[in-house]
Image (tube, rainbow, N blue to C red):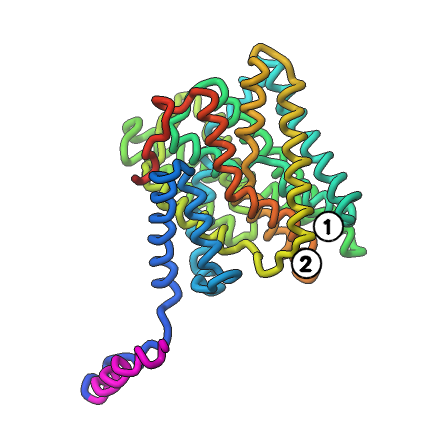
C-alpha cells in the first residue's frame, strides 16, 4: 500500500531529476536522525498528555515512546539512530548526574547518625539480598550475580531528581530521598568498578585486566572530574555569581568531561557524578553553589529517556525472566524499606517508609551500567544481564509513579498538587 501511495511522487521526482541534476535520488526511507527527532516530539507530547490527564510523571511518557517506537517493537527508531543519539543521551545523563553529585551533603551524615545507619543499611542490604537472589534463585554465577547487584542496588538519580523538580517538592522526605539516592549511587559506582575486575577474573585466566580495568575506570573518572571541576571553578570565579556566563561555563566543562570520558572509555555517569561532588566540596567561596542549570536540561531528559526506552531488549523477554525481574524488585524493595524502617531516629516511621518508597526508581543509570558490563563479553553479558535490564524496564514505568506518590503523601509537593514543571 505504501508503494502505491509513493508511486506518483516517485515518478514526478524522477522526471525532475532529468532537468535538475543536483537533486538526490528519490528517498526510499526517512532519514534516521529526522525520524528520531519526530519521535522525540511524540515522546514529549505523550509525556505532557499523561501528566495533564492522569497526573503521571512526564518521564513515563518519554520511556513509553522510546519503548513502543524502538527496535524491540515497531522499529521506527533504528539501531543506527540510537547510535547517533547516544552522545546526546550521555550528555543528558551526565548533566543530571552532576546535579546529583552537587546536591550530595556528606557533612549531613556526620551530624546525623540516623542517616548514616539508614544509608549504610540501604547499601549493604540492597547489595546482599539482590546478590543472594541472583545467585541462589536465578542461578547466576557469583561474578554475574555481583554485577546484577551492582547495577540494581542504587536508586535512579535522574528519575528522582527530575520527579522532585517536576513536582516542586521540598522538605525532610525530599532531602532524604536525594541524599539516599546520591549515596547509594556512589556505592553502586564503587561496586561497579570492583565487579569489572571480578567479571574479568572469572572470564580470563590472566590477572592484568582484572586489576587494570577497574583502576582505569576509577582513576580516569576521578582525574577527568578533577580537571574539569577545577577548570569550571577557576573560570567561574572571574564571572558574576548566578550569571548566564557561569551557567555556560558549568555546562561547557560538563560536556568537556563527557567528551573526554567517551574518548577514553571511562563511564560518563561516574565521571560527571564525581565532577558534581568535587564542585560541591572544592568551592569554599560558593562560586557555583547556587548556579542552577536552565530549564533546558528537561529537553535533554526527553532524549535520555526515549533512548533508554528504545534500548530495552523487549525482543528477548520471556515470562521466566519477567517473573525473576519482579522477584528481584521485590527483594530490592524489602531491603530498602527495611533499612529505612529499622534505622530509627527522629523522623516518624510513616515518613521513613515514604523515603523508602521514594528511592525505589531504577532507570537510566542501571541500563547504562548494564550495557557497559555486557559490552565486555557480549556473548555472555547480553544474556546474564537481561535480568537487571528487565527489572529496570519495569521500574522505568513504576519507579517515577512511586517516587511521585511518596512526595505527594509526604505533603511536600508545592500546593499539594503536581505543577506543570519541566518544559510545559
Residue name at image x 44 percent, y 19 percent: 171
Question: Which quarter of the picture shows residue 6?
Answer: bottom left
Instruction: Pick out the residue farthest to the bottom.
Output: 18
Left/right placement of residue 320 relative to residue 226 reads right
Residue 393 lies, in percent from the top left, at: 56, 48
Residue name at image x 72 percent, y 48 percent: 144
Of labels 1 and 2, earlier in sequence is 1
Residue name at image x 52 percent, y 38 percent: 399
**Any magenta on residue 323?**
no
Q: Considering the numbered disc 1 on the image, is that residue within a helix, a strand or a loop?
A: helix
Q: Identify the residue under disc 1.
A: 199
**Any magenta on residue 13?**
yes
Residue 408 lies, in percent from the top left, at: 44, 25
The foreground one among 26 and 179 is 26
Q: Identify the residue under disc 2.
A: 377
Question: Which quarter of the picture shows residue 355?
Answer: top right
Residue 371 lies, in percent from the top left, at: 59, 53
Residue name at image x 47 percent, y 21 percent: 410
Left/right placement of residue 29 relative to residue 213 reads left
The foreground one among 214 and 50 is 50
Mark 2 neighbour density, 10 Å: few (under 14) some (14–19) many (20 or more) = few
Instruction: Pick out the residue farthest to the left.
Output: 19
Q: Quadrant location of the N terminus?
A: bottom left
Mark 1 neighbour density, 10 Å: few (under 14) some (14–19) many (20 or more) = many
Which contiguous range is marked in magenta? 1-18
The foreground one among 183 and 345 is 345
Report if residue 265 is visible in the image: yes
Left/right placement of residue 148 relative to residue 57 reads right
| Distance CA(mark 1)–CA(mark 2) | 9 Å
Magenta stretch secondary structure, dominant: helix
From this view, report whether residue 12 is shown above or below residue 247: below
Q: Considering the numbered disc 2 on the image, is that residue within a helix, a strand or a loop?
A: loop
Amino acid at each position: 500500500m505504501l508503494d502505491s501511495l509513493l508511486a506518483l511522487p516517485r515518478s514526478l521526482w524522477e522526471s525532475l531529476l532529468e532537468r535538475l541534476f543536483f537533486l538526490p535520488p528519490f528517498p526510499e526511507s526517512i532519514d534516521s536522525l529526522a525520524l528520531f527527532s519526530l519521535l522525540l516530539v511524540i515522546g514529549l507530547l505523550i509525556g505532557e498528555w499523561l501528566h495533564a490527564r492522569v497526573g503521571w510523571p512526564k518521564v513515563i511518557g518519554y520511556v513509553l515512546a522510546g519503548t513502543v517506537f524502538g527496535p524491540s517493537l515497531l522499529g521506527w527508531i533504528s539501531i543506527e539512530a540510537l547510535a547517533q543519539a547516544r552522545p546526546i543521551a550521555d550528555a543528558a545523563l551526565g548533566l543530571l548526574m552532576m546535579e546529583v553529585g552537587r546536591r550530595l551533603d556528606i557533612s549531613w551524615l556526620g551530624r546525623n547518625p540516623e542517616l548514616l545507619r539508614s544509608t549504610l543499611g540501604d547499601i549493604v542490604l540492597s547489595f546482599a539480598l539482590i546478590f543472594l537472589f541472583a545467585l541462589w534463585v536465578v542461578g547466576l554465577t557469583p561474578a554475574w550475580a555481583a554485577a546484577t547487584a551492582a547495577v540494581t542496588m542504587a536508586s535512579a538519580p535522574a528519575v528522582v531528581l527530575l520527579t522532585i523538580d517536576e513536582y516542586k517538592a521540598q522538605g525532610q522526605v525530599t532531602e532524604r530521598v536525594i541524599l539516599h539516592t546520591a549515596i547509594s549511587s556512589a556505592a553502586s559506582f564503587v561496586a561497579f568498578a570492583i565487579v569489572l575486575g571480578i567479571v574479568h577474573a572469572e572470564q580470563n585466566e590472566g590477572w592484568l585486566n582484572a586489576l587494570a580495568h577497574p583502576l582505569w575506570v576509577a582513576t580516569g573518572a576521578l582525574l577527568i572530574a578533577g580537571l574539569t571541576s577545577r577548570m569550571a571553578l577557576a573560570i567561574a570565579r572571574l564571572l558574576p555569581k548566578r550569571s548566564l556566563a557561569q551557567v555556560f561555563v558549568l555546562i561547557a566543562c560538563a560536556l568537556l568531561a563527557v567528551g573526554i570520558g567517551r574518548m577514553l572509555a571511562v563511564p560518563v555517569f561516574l565521571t560527571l557524578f564525581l565532577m558534581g561532588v568535587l564542585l560541591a566540596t572544592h568551592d569554599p567561596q560558593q562560586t557555583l553553589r547556587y548556579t542552577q542549570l536552565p530549564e533546558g536540561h528537561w529537553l535533554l531528559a526527553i532524549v535520555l529517556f526515549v533512548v533508554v526506552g528504545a534500548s530495552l531488549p523487549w525482543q528477548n523477554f520471556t515470562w521466566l525472566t519477567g517473573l525473576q525481574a519482579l522477584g528481584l524488585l521485590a527483594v530490592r524493595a524489602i531491603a530498602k524499606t527495611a533499612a529505612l524502617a529499622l534505622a530509627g531516629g527522629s523522623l516518624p516511621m510513616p515518613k521513613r517508609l515514604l523515603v523508602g518508597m521514594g528511592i525505589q526508581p531504577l532507570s537510566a543509570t542501571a541500563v547504562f551500567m548494564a550495557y557497559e558490563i555486557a559490552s565486555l563479553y557480549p556473548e555472555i553479558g547480553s544474556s546474564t544481564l537481561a535480568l537487571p535490564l528487565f527489572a529496570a524496564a519495569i521500574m522505568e514505568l513504576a519507579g517515577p509513579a512511586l517516587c511521585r506518590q511518596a512526595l505527594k503523601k509526604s505533603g511536600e509537593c508545592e500546593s499539594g498538587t503536581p505543577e506543570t514543571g519541566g518544559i510545559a
